[in-house]
Amino acid sequence: MASSKASPSPPPSTTESTQQNPQSEEMVTPTASDISSVLDSPANKAQEAHHIAFFNSIPWCSSLLGSTPNLIISQSVSRIIRPSGCEEDALISQTLNSPDAIPAYITFYSPPPKPTDYVNEIKSLIALGPKVNGWEGICHGGIVMTLLDEVMGQIFAVNKDSGAMGSKMPLLTGYLNTAFKRPVRTGTKEKPAIVLVVARMTKIEGRKHFCEGVVYGDEEGRNELARAEALFVQLREQKL
């Protein structure tokens, strides 16, 4: 990444920091109705602040985060520190949450006109270290698809939390058609590469939700590296 100054060291993972014990008495098992209380726990607020500070210390990321008034910036719901024994979102919150895999990940979006209006676009900044390599210095294609699927999924998390989505039922990926345009570069443990992922909701047909996503990187996030079109299907409500 081109930059006017050296990139800072990435924030420590939850397994290598003072946040390594997620069993805070203030934390609760996350569900659709109480996810906000989990995000507001001291450990998660500290992790969120650390990751936002990390991206704000990189000039082009800071410019992006400061470009729109009232931008809502937070860590991904799937990245939160969870109580011991909870394996929900384990891939993003545990397996890939390390200084040499994906050490930092935040989402941001413009607030809708009304709190319960639908948010159709989510953006994420994600740091990539060497442990997500396929070829040396290049992110594995399966991980690139995971990033696209992950950020698209944040659209549903945000809208469920706000009440914009009437149903709290989960959505599952129906398909994820991905075109790889350029290699997605990774960095080192000391200086991870940064990608910008943009996800948009394009259409809703009943329980079917159609999305598109793009991964940008290189040259301060200017180049399109991969693009995907996806279908997510919401599970039916259980009838008693």
Image (cartoon, rainbow, N blue to C red):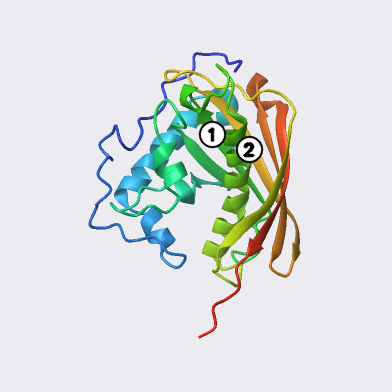
x 58%, y 16%: residue: 3
x 65%, y 57%: residue: 119
Query: Is 138 displayed left or right of 240 in the figure?
Result: right
- Label 1 is placed on what type of residue? Ile
Which residue is the site of mark 2?
Answer: 197
x 34%, y 61%: residue: 29
- Label 2 is placed on what type of residue? Val
Across and down, in percent, residue 211 comes to 71, 51
Across and down, in percent, residue 224 comes to 73, 29
Q: Is the Cβ of the residue at disc 2 closer than 8 Å to that at disc 1? A: yes
Picture quadrant where residue 159 is located: bottom right
Residue 221 higher or lower than 82, as above or below: above
The numbered mark, 2 or 1, whose residue comes first in the sequence reads 1
Q: Which mark is residue 137?
A: none
Which residue is the site of mark 1?
Answer: 126
x 22%, y 57%: residue: 25
Does residue 230 appear anywhere in the picture? yes
Residue 59 higher or lower than 112, as above or below: above
